[in-house]
């Protein structure tokens, strides 16, 4: 899905914040809320950018109507944003009636670049250079350095190469990493990277001198679905790979939890009848049932198509068991799956839906939707871009 297809016109603007991705602005900032005088200009800049991001090209008069700001204020802000390289004039609007045609303005998608890194792969790191509308113009992969390699050195060098290949001012670097990450970009624990208590955000900032945001890969993924994938305000993205994790939005805002571990569902026990032993040492963890290595191995042992379908349905049922309390507690509207479509799309997702519906309040949650992401394998890269857009421009 292209950005233009996913854009939503701001029918009811709401106030937003540019404080960081964890406080991402609602998609339609509300101009009726109070804004302190010292924050008014930054708020109004974000309001204009947010409106253009979702509404596309429009005239200054259109912007005034959509945001509730005066035409004088809009003219002043647009001139400032053009000078800063964030907005550009796009020609005149075609009209059939007499009069001077309005000049349209829009985000200058080519004026800046965003660098995104996805460190969640088991065998490689993926990086990209993106425009402000989330279009990936450069995409690269490097081998995972391995347990004995210089992981941090490889990440820093890779980010530097992407910055050098941006050929435009870099708005910031967003990083989606496995593991638990605190609000300041410190990786509390990431066994797949061999990092514990490491300030990855600080290391990147010191080396590259550009704004950096580091977050859990699933938390980045759910932002990509929200901004570019048409997801609603109450949604969960489940990422299935070597491990299992999820990102959550409630009321359009990311949920990170008191220990920054919201969405870590991989080690929730989903079997009272035993089950496979997990790498953590427990028996019956969700990850031990539905991770890609586990599913692949179980499917290889299945000798018939019906046996393969049974394996996938069993795994989907286990996911439904884990998700039912979350869906019930948070009143989620949909669950989005991110992972190999040949494993997750079909009997697996069908069994997940059936289990959810039997384990939640029928009249309320019978319409729960479970679907595959439309963002494909670059969902974390695009989510990393949203983190930068939100932190630097107040756009989400």
Image: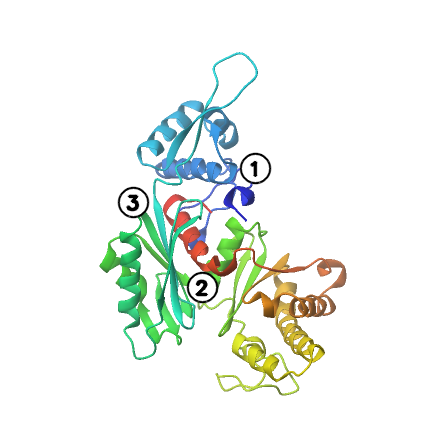
**Residue position marked by numbered label 3 in the rendering:** 169
Position of 55 relative to 391 (above/below):
above
Instruction: Name the residue beneath numbered marker 2.
Output: 217
| Res. 12 mark | 1
Can you tell which quarter of the image residue 139 is in? Answer: bottom left
- Identify the element where label 3 is drawn: loop
**Residues under labels 3 and 1: Cα distance?**
32 Å
Q: Secondary structure at mark 2?
A: helix
Does residue 389 appear in the picture of this structure? yes
What secondary structure is found at the residue carrying circle 1? Answer: loop
- Image position, residue 105 (x, y; %): 43, 30
Question: For the point 40% across and 23% down, which residue is it?
Answer: 72
Labels 2, 1: front one? 2
The numbered disc on residue 282 is: none
Mark-to-mark CA distance, 2 and 1: 31 Å
* Mark 2 or 1, nearer chain start: 1
Of the pair 222 and 258, the residue shown nearer to us: 222
Give residue 238's position: percent from left, percent from top: 55, 65
Q: Quadrant of residue 71?
A: top left
**Would residue 38 appear left or right of 47 to someone viewing this image?**
left
Q: Decide which of tag 3 and tag 2 comes sooner along the chain.
A: 3
């Amino acid at each position: 899905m292209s950005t233009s297809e996913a854009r939503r016109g701001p029918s009811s603007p709401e106030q937003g914040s540019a404080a960081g991705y964890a406080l991402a602005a609602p998609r339609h900032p509300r101009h009726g809320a109070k804004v302190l005088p010292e924050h008014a200009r930054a708020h109004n800049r974000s309001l204009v950018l947010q409106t253009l991001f979702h509404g596309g090209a429009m005239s200054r008069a259109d912007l005034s109507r959509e945001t509730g700001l005066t035409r004088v204020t809009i003219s002043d802000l647009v001139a400032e944003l053009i000078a800063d390289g964030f907005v550009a004039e796009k020609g005149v609007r075609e009209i059939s009636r007499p009069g001077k045609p309005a000049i349209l303005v829009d985000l200058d998608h080519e004026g800046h670049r965003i660098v995104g890194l996805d460190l969640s792969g088991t065998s490689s790191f993926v990086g990209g250079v993106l425009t402000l509308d989330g279009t990936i113009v450069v995409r690269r992969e490097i081998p995972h350095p391995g347990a004995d390699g210089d992981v941090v050195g490889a990440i820093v060098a890779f980010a530097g190469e992407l910055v050098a290949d941006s050929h435009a001012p870099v708005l910031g670097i967003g990083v989606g990493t496995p593991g638990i990450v605190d609000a300041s970009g410190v990786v509390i624990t990431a066994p797949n990277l061999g990092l514990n208590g490491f300030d990855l955000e600080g290391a990147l900032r010191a080396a590259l001198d550009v704004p950096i945001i580091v977050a859990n890969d699933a938390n980045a993924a759910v932002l990509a679905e929200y901004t570019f994938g048409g997801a609603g305000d109450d949604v969960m993205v489940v990422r299935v790979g070597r491990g299992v994790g999820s990102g959550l939005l409630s009321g359009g805002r990311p949920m990170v939890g008191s220990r920054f571990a919201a969405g870590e569902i991989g080690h929730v026990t989903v079997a009272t009848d035993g089950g496979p032993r997990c790498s953590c040492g427990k028996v019956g963890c969700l990850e031990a049932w539905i991770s890609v290595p586990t599913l692949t191995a179980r499917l290889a042992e299945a000798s018939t198509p019906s046996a393969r379908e049974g394996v996938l349905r069993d795994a989907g049922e286990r996911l439904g068991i884990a998700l039912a309390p979350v869906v019930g507690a948070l009143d989620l509207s949909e669950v989005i799956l991110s992972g190999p479509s040949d494993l997750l799309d079909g009997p697996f997702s069908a069994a997940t839906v059936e289990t959810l519906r039997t384990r939640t309040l029928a009249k309320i949650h019978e319409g729960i939707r479970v679907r595959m992401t439309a963002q494909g394998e670059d969902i974390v890269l695009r989510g990393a871009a949203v983190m930068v857009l939100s932190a630097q421009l107040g756009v989400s």
